[in-house]
Image (cartoon, helix red, strand yellow):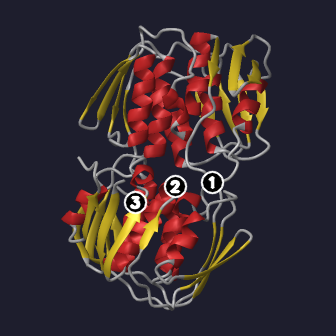
Amino acid sequence: MRSFCIEGGHTLSGEVTISGSKNAALALIPCSLLTKDKVVLRGVPRIKDIFQQIEILKKLNVDVKFVDHTLTIKSNKLIKCDLTFEEMKHFRASYYFYGALLWRLKDMKVVPPGGCKLGTRPIDLHLFALKEMGVNISFCDGIYEFKATETLNNYLRFPRISMGATINALLYAVSLNKTITIENYSKEPEVFEVIKMLQMMGAKISYNEDVILIDERHQLKGTTFNVIGDRIEAGTFILLGASLGKDLTIHHIEKKHLESLFDILDELNVDYQYEKETMRINKTKSIKPVTVETGPYPSFPSDLQPLLTSYLLTVPRIHLIKEMIYEDRFSHLAELEKCGAVIKRINHNIIINGDNELHHAKMEGKDLRATASLVFIALNINGISEVKGIEYFERGYEDFVEKILKLGGKMSIVGDDVK
């Protein structure tokens, strides 16, 4: 089994450029199936989840070319088949194929999505949205069967906010011969990137703070679209800069996508400057306690909670994080305790004592963001730590080891199957 070997305590300096957004790219790629024309996506990260998505496209007989970070897709020879491929089980965002393909396939069988285990993670809101828009759904022996019908509502209000379900609703709604209104929708940046791309393809979509309005179907055309920077990777390097940086310069950051993190930096008086998608940040000794609550955008993102937990272990005060999105995003806590961290969980609350000596350890991540938090703390601790869970980590971070080495950190991948 491969693992990270990390010698911590080294200053990080120099320049790093944030890769394209994993969560945005995974939603934008299915948009290409809404037209038979060529679609070009630039800035696509070369990570495991993207390659899984490409394998699904190939099994659908979609023409795909992935050169450097440019993905070219043409689905004019798409075949009708069920989405019961093994790849559908390997990542969470496989559910975007539901909304993107229904208008062309009319009926199909699909397996439920995979992804990190963060609790029950139901797809009930995805199914709710599709049902409201006229899709008959049945479930038998672990397989969903979808059948598109002409009977649908033109009004959809989500009972809870969900980024994935909002995007899935958009992907299907643009194919319908009816005007659709969506209320209580997610306002995550990735949602607006999907809207922007669909508009460029010819969809008639408007929105305000309360509703999204999709006009009845228009013929969609091909387009070229640039993927935004990954705000979770950006957050990772920002926090590393606050704990280890010396004139660390980070490019391709959109501040408005991370305002909640910048608020924390300001509260802790972290030394940074930001201008035109570039940030320069330095290690900053802070002795202020913070209280943070995760929530839908623009609240603090749950995906950054494990990394913030690790960062606050370097700030010598008592801190509180309230995890309000995922019921089981706490697997990193027991692993952090192996390096001397003093952390207590009470229901959805994480109480962090940042005033303790930490030591190197062997740790194992159980999901993508948990593994990232362990890598983070290992980079901060003197001595050599081992972190397992690379198979999760590679789902969301591109060339991370190379980026750290370039900045002066010391880490490598060891194991029998290292390529």
Residue occupied by mark 1: 118
Q: Quadrant of residue 89?
A: top right
Q: CA distance from mark 1 to mark 3?
A: 22 Å
User: Do the numbered discs 1 and 2 sit on residues whose CB atoms are within 8 Å?
Assistant: yes
**Of residues 15 and 139, which is closer to you in this image?**
139
The answer to which of marks 1 and 3 sits earlier in the sequence is 1
Camera-nearest residue between 159 and 56: 56
Question: Which image quadrant is residue 12 in?
Answer: bottom left
Q: Secondary structure at mark 3?
A: helix
Q: Secondary structure at mark 2?
A: loop
> Which residue is identified by label 2?
367
Q: Amino acid at mark 3?
A: Ala
Rounded to the nearest angstrom, the CA distance separating label 3 from label 2 is: 19 Å
* Side of 122 relative to 306 (left or right): right
Q: How crowded is the residue under tag 3: few (<14 C-alpha within 10 Å), some, or many (20+)?
A: many
Q: Amino acid at mark 2?
A: Asp
Q: Vertical placement of 381 versus 323: above or below? A: below
- Looking at the rendered structure, the kind of residue marked 1 is Leu
Q: Secondary structure at mark 1?
A: loop
Labels 1 & 3 near each other (Cβ < 8 A): no
Q: How would you rate the neighbour count of disc 2 (Cα within 10 Å): few for under 14, some for 14-19, many for 20 or more?
A: many
**Horizontal and vertical percent for residue 292?**
62, 73
